[in-house]
Every structure is written in structure tokens, then in C-alpha cells.
Image (cartoon, rainbow, N blue to C red):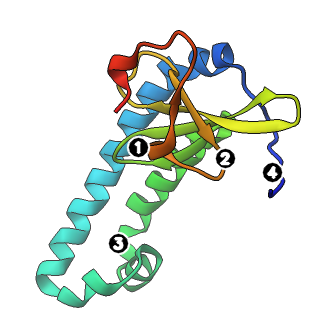
Amino acid sequence: MPSYRFDKLFTPAEANELIPRLEVAIRDLQAKAGELRRLIAELVEFDPAVRQLALPKIVERYPQLRESAGQLAQAAEKIESYGCLLKDIDQGLVDFPWEMEEDRVNFLCWQFGEPAVIAWHPVDAGFAQRQPLPGAPKRYLN
């Protein structure tokens, strides 16, 4: 089993304290991602080959995107500066390293729109494998 090291480990209560800030940060991040996508979609109309390029190559080819791409990167870095991991911009997925048992780290898993952290999953799994935290309302789990 691989060994993972994280700078910060969260308790569910510590993760929940961040939710109000994360809600604002995720909204901002999603808005910046939407704006960058809109700008790229405009470029595709004139240069269909853009569809085949990864974002860094698109920004290299079209320097006018640097500011938007930079703002998106800063918004993502802000979220990760709290010690959590941004997993998906569109779904607003954030994971928090959590020592569930001594020497066994898992992720607390929060999705934008959930009232609190209500689930967890192993580090080597993802959203689809998340399990409810004890006492969590199951109506929020897929």
C-alpha cells in the first residue's frame, strides 16, 4: 500500500470550519473557469485546431489568455492554500486529508452545495467510492 504524506491533517470539525470560505472560493473559481472557457470557445471559431490543444499550449499560442488563465490558477491556489485538495472545478469537489485511524490517512470529501463534510473515501479512490461519515445525512450522498 502506498504511503502518502500531507502537510496538514483535518478533523471533520476543522474541515467544516472552512466550508463558508470554500463556498465563496469555489464560486469565484467556477466563474473564472467559465470566463476562460468562453474566451477559448471564441478562439475555436477562428482556429478549430485549438480543440486539440492542452490549456498551457493554448495560452502559449494566444497570450491574450494569460491574464484569465493566471486568475484561474490563483483562485485554485487559494483553495489549496487552506491545506485541502481541489479535485474538480465544475463539481466543486474538495478533499481534506484526514487521519481516520492512527497511521491511516483517508480523505474527507466535500462537494459544493453540501452543508458540511458528510463523506470520506480512501486516498487512492475518488468521489464515486465515498462513504458516509457516521451521522451524516444520507440524502446528500449519491
In depth, the one of 133 and 63 nearer the eye is 133
Which secondary structure lies at badge 3? Answer: helix
Which residue is label 2 attached to? Answer: 123
Mark closer to the chain start, 1 or 3: 1
Amino acid type for the residue under numbered disc 2: Val
Asked whether the residues under the numbered discs 4 and 2 touch, taking CB atoms below 8 Å apart as contact, a structural biologist would say yes
Which secondary structure lies at badge 2? Answer: loop
Q: Position of residue 8 (x, y in %)?
A: 79, 34
Mark closer to the chain start, 4 or 2: 4
Between the C-alphas of marks 1 and 3, the distance is 19 Å
Q: Position of residue 89 (x, y in %)?
A: 40, 48
Amino acid type for the residue under numbered disc 3: Gln
Between the C-alphas of marks 4 and 2, the distance is 8 Å
Which secondary structure lies at badge 1? Answer: helix
**Badge nearest the viewer, 1 or 3:** 1
Graded by Cα atoms within 10 Å as few (under 14), some (14 to 19) or many (20 or more), the crowding at tag 1 reads: many
Graded by Cα atoms within 10 Å as few (under 14), some (14 to 19) or many (20 or more), the crowding at tag 4 reads: few
Q: Quadrant of residue 23?
A: top left
Q: Position of residue 7 (x, y in %)?
A: 82, 41
Left or right, 98 with respect to 51, comes to right
